[in-house]
Amino acid sequence: MTITQIVKLIPSLVRYNLRIIFAGKFIWFFLAALAFFGFFMFQSAWDRTDMNDAEIYSLMFFPSLLLVFYPAVFGIQNDEENRILEILFGIPNYRYKVWGIRLLIIYVAILFILILFAYISTWLMYPVDEIIMAIQLMFPVVFVGNLAFMLSTITRSGNGTAVTTIMIGFTLSMLQGSELLGNGTFDVFVNPYDMPNNFHPTIWATTILKNRVFLFVGSIVLFMIGLLNLQKREKFV
């Protein structure tokens, strides 16, 4: 197969995997995320909130997690219900490539959607660096997505994974800003643009750098654990 043929095949491959990943519901999750983002913007405007980068990050945070929640949580269950797991386990190491490509497609799609949301916020609310804002949001998105993927390989149930992920998220949100999470170093929900009053800018920049390294490394570890769990064929087929 030539490079030209591969390039022509990529759009079809992406559309096919998006239909599987989102179970034909991609447009609804996109519209739901857009609706929440629009509602948060309207609420901020109604309350006359002082807009800045930190506020825009907060407005985009929940919609970004909403975009990754369904495909990461229900991916394994959708494969099982559609009998795709039997095919994936029938070809050695094929399941690793499939899920690696799927997660990559999910994150690339979400990145472009977040850039779009950032452009909307720049146009309607407050000017931000759209690409940097989207990249900053991708750190917690990828971490949560890989966490949900890892949990789904353990529970093999979309509902069970959803409940577990929500409970973990609720616990982490309750601990936000505490010393237990290193005052932001290990905090998934930390806002890199919202520096506390008692922090020196240099210390805060170092804290955010450590946080992003933690989320990046943690995402890789969670993804590898999920792939290792997929080796247990008897649990899935």
Image: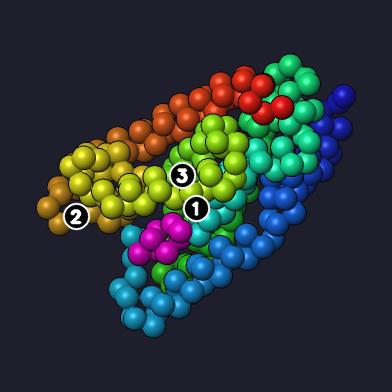
* Extreme residue toward the top, this view: 92
Question: Camera-side residue: 207 or 21?
Answer: 21
Q: How many marks?
A: 3
Q: Residue at x 50, y 59 (%)?
A: 63
Give the image location of residue 230, x and y in percent: 61, 24
Query: Which callout, 2 or 3, points at the residue further toward the start of the chain?
Result: 3
* Pair 3/1: label in front: 3
The disc label shown at residue 196, or none: 2
* Pair 2/1: label in front: 1
* Pair 2/3: label in front: 3
Q: Which residue is mark 1?
A: 65
Give the image location of residue 91, x and y in percent: 78, 20
Query: Which callout, 2 or 1, points at the residue further toward the start of the chain?
Result: 1
Asked whether the residues under the numbered discs 2 and 3 touch, taking CB atoms below 8 Å apart as contact, a structural biologist would say no
Q: Disc 2 to disc 3, how far (Cα)?
A: 30 Å
Question: Camera-side residue: 81 or 75?
Answer: 81
Sort mark 2 into few (<14), some (14-19) or many (20+) by Cα contacts within 10 Å. few
Q: Which residue is mark 3?
A: 164
Q: Is residue 233 above or below residue 4?
A: above
- The range drawn in magenta is 55-62
Callout 3: SS: helix
Q: Is residue 237 above or below residue 67?
A: above
Which SS does the magenta portion mostly show?
A: helix
* Extreme residue toward the bottom, this view: 46
Query: Which callout, 3 or 1, points at the residue further toward the start of the chain?
Result: 1
Dot 2 amino acid type: Pro
Left or right of 165, for residue 196: left
